[in-house]
Amino acid sequence: MKLRTTIKIFTASVVAAIQINTAFAEEAVNFNTSFLDSDSQEIDFSKFSRANYVMPGTYLLATKLNNNVITSDENILFYSPEYDQEITVPCITPELFAQLAMKEEWQNKVSWTAQDKLQCLDIRTIPDMQATGDIADNKLNIRIPQAYMVYSDPSWDPPERWDDGIAGFLFDYNATATHSKYQPGSDNDKSSKTDIVSYGDTGVNLGAWRVRAEWQATGGDSAEHSKRWRWNQIYAYRALRDLSARLMFGEQYLTSELFESFRYIGMSMETDENMFPPLLRGYAPEVAGVARTNATVIIRQGERIIYQEQVSKGPFRIRDMNYIGDGTLSVTIKEQDGSEQHFTIETSRLSMLTRPGQFLFKLAAGKPLSDDHKTEGPEFGTGSFSWGMSNNTTLFGGVLAATDYQNVSVGIGRDIAPFGVFSAKVSYSRANMGDFADKQNKTGGSYSITYSKEFDAINSQLTFAGYRFSERDYMTMNQFVDLRYRGGNTDNSKEMYNIIFNKVFPSLRMNVYLNYSHQTFWNKASINNYSMTLSRNFDWGEKKNLSMSMSAYRTESDSTKDNGIYASLSVPLDDNKGMFSYSGSYNKNSHSNNVNYYTDIDNSSNYSLSAGEGDGKINLAGFYTNEGGNNYLSLSGTYIQDNVLTVSGQSRGGFTLTREGAAFHRSGNSMAPRILVDTSGTPDIDVRGTGKAVRTNAFGKAIIPTATAYSRGQLSLDLDAMPDNAEALTSVQQATLTSGAIGYRKFNVVEGYKIMGIIAMNDNTHPPFGASVMNDKNAEIGIVADNGSAYLTGIQSGQKLTVAWNGQTQCTVRIPEIKDDNVQFNMLLPCQ
């Protein structure tokens, strides 16, 4: 008897191992059962003797194509085809076939069959195609030769697999509040001041369309803005997959590398480079500066806030803005001592190179729009293109035309290897500043060149980020509208250039960054900005990865000069969770010296403290940040002796509502997709996607706020942090979403008791070894072992389970009431 039991256990182990690999078997497994005794009749070999056999029925499965998951869970029908009743095949519907992204020639080569009111692909019509079910892993596995499919790469899917998401409502915000209390004798004549600045997006998604409204609000004592609430722009857009373009209607800014950006209401259609494979995707400007205290950096395009961030004292570099077209950005650094720094940056795309054979276009039409939503100026139309003429040469050009204003621009971009990359552009404008009876035409040209070169041999990069010279009577559309229709006098640029040099010294672990910008005007004084940053990492005895940096800057504007220097030294703590540092800043009017302490509290939060003196006065400061599950929060405070006490807070977050559920979350981006994650109603599940993990709420919902449009992203459950009463039947999903989409991905998670049960029939026999136990969602939650034993997860009191073998359901189990949260052993489960 003992030997028999041992043999049966060994047999069960072998069969179980075979079953695990069944989904990947290419041929049927035939068993020689003669070595088994009469107990062999208690084993359901039908499950293992037919390759990839799945009992007929409908299953909730995700589709996996050539080892990449391309769909979330959906109902897949398995049926026995007429040509072979001994096997089952999955029903690949026309909708699922489209997501396989086969080359167009296959559309007319395949044939279809009708099954249970569904149209199903005849898999035999595609040579070497395999489609098998893995019920235990909740996957439909499809393999197709790559030669039959359109282009894709590991991080990019073809348009056939892009997901427009589901309908929904969204609201995102970014709010900063600052309160300052001034001491008697300070430079400020007020006893206190409160400022509140916030902005964000709200909108709805309907199919492929996204409707957005950008808003901003100010409050408190600041007189910086006359309006406390304003809608910045309201617009609707959608992706045009066949053209790799975006279509937009409403209030918007012209985004062009040829013409300066301006605000208008109308329509636009332009190539969206994000739809291309990842190697060629856009450009974004960089903003760098030095904060004298804890500060808030606000970046505007006109009156519209496009970026806001709290920064701690010292140098900062902002690199995560979206590209907004050529033009001028206004930067304000609001210091906690009450002072402000103001400067502007010119944005331009460094190189106009386009891949050989590629053609990019931009079309727009409408009417210029003021910041208070009033149209002004003539109706206009514009079109521009960029054509990759050869492997190293790109031609580009465009026209902007209105009744009284025209601008023509042409240029060339060229890779002059090994000397670098340059582009040159010539623009010509004509503007009628009078009426039709009294024409006052002003004509002028503008000439620009950009250059960039990486010197790999010496670990350096030189960027001549744009030289531009404009004649006195050259006008942009903004200048024309301001002068002709507003009676204004917009700054008339004459000459502008920006030079950036970056050098790395690997052996010294040192980096040098130089930046010089020069701008002159026809109607005001010139502006010059110089900055240099030197940084180095080094070891000192047993202390590793110490760092030091020094930044110097000089600004010349309106006959005034502002020079300054900033130095710091950082020493990491032994646990690598924090550091001590020294920082000092000096200019002609003031100086400060501070010691700082920084440490991580946990994976989501950190804080820093500093103390020092400046201009003979003691100053104290603190900075705290927390990037929790639902929002980003930062708190800071600064005390300056006999001057001011300032506290400030920033919060970023959002809310998304859909028919599948809703959740609060960290803030997103109006054009970035977000994903609603559903863990089948199970709360407190950590989900990893882009950025920090998020946790599902009480309804089993969470939002991944910033996915990447048109790039394949992966979502996964943190199995190590799963609640004890939860079991994930699917733990990984993938998504490729269009711009602004609200994606929806559901993980098959079962919540409930764990049971080691014994399934018994009415005649006191047991289901055969290998029989499947399915829940009410037709998901396999266990396999019957010897003597009817089965380990089952996600079990609820009163739940109905089905047990199947020999290709069909044989009996059902009704779970009795369970009162103990611990694993239930040897629970008798009658199967009727």
Image: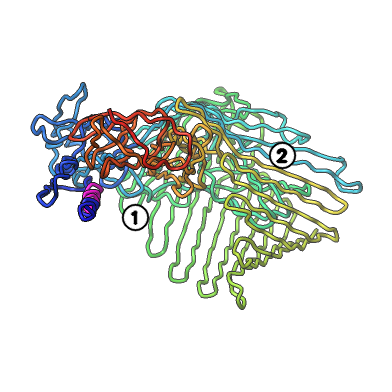
Q: In the picture, residue 770 is in which quadrant?
A: top left
The majority secondary structure of the magenta stretch comes to: helix
Q: Where residue 165 appears, x then y in whole percent?
A: 40, 31
Whether residue 82 is visible here, answered yes or no, is yes
Residue type at the position of mark 1: Asn
Q: In the picture, residue 550 is in which quadrant?
A: bottom right
Whether residue 266 is visible here, answered yes or no, is no
Camera-side residue: 639 or 30?
30
Tell me the residue at 66%/46% (across/down): 634
Camera-side residue: 49 or 570?
49
| Left or right: 574 in relation to 28 | right
Which quarter of the rendered picture does the C terminus lie within? Answer: top left
| Left or right: 125 in relation to 209 | left
Outermost residue, front side: 1
The residue tagged 1 is 392
Camera-side residue: 609 or 585?
609
Tell me the residue at 70%/60% (across/down): 597
Colouring chosen for the image of the structure: rainbow
User: Is 780 placed above or below 594 here?
Assistant: above
Outermost residue, bottom side: 541
Q: Residues within 10 Å of mark 2 (few under 14, many from 20)?
A: some
Which comes sooner in the sequence, label 1 or label 2?
2
Nearer mark to the viewer, of 1 and 2: 2
Residue type at the position of mark 2: Ala
Q: Where residue 404 appears, x then y in whole percent?
A: 52, 28
Membership of 11 in magenta stretch = yes
Mark 2: secondary structure? strand
Membership of 655 in magenta stretch = no
The magenta stretch is 10-21
Q: Where residue 437 appears, x then y in whole percent?
A: 56, 22
The residue tagged 2 is 177
Q: Residues within 10 Å of mark 1 (few under 14, many from 20)?
A: some
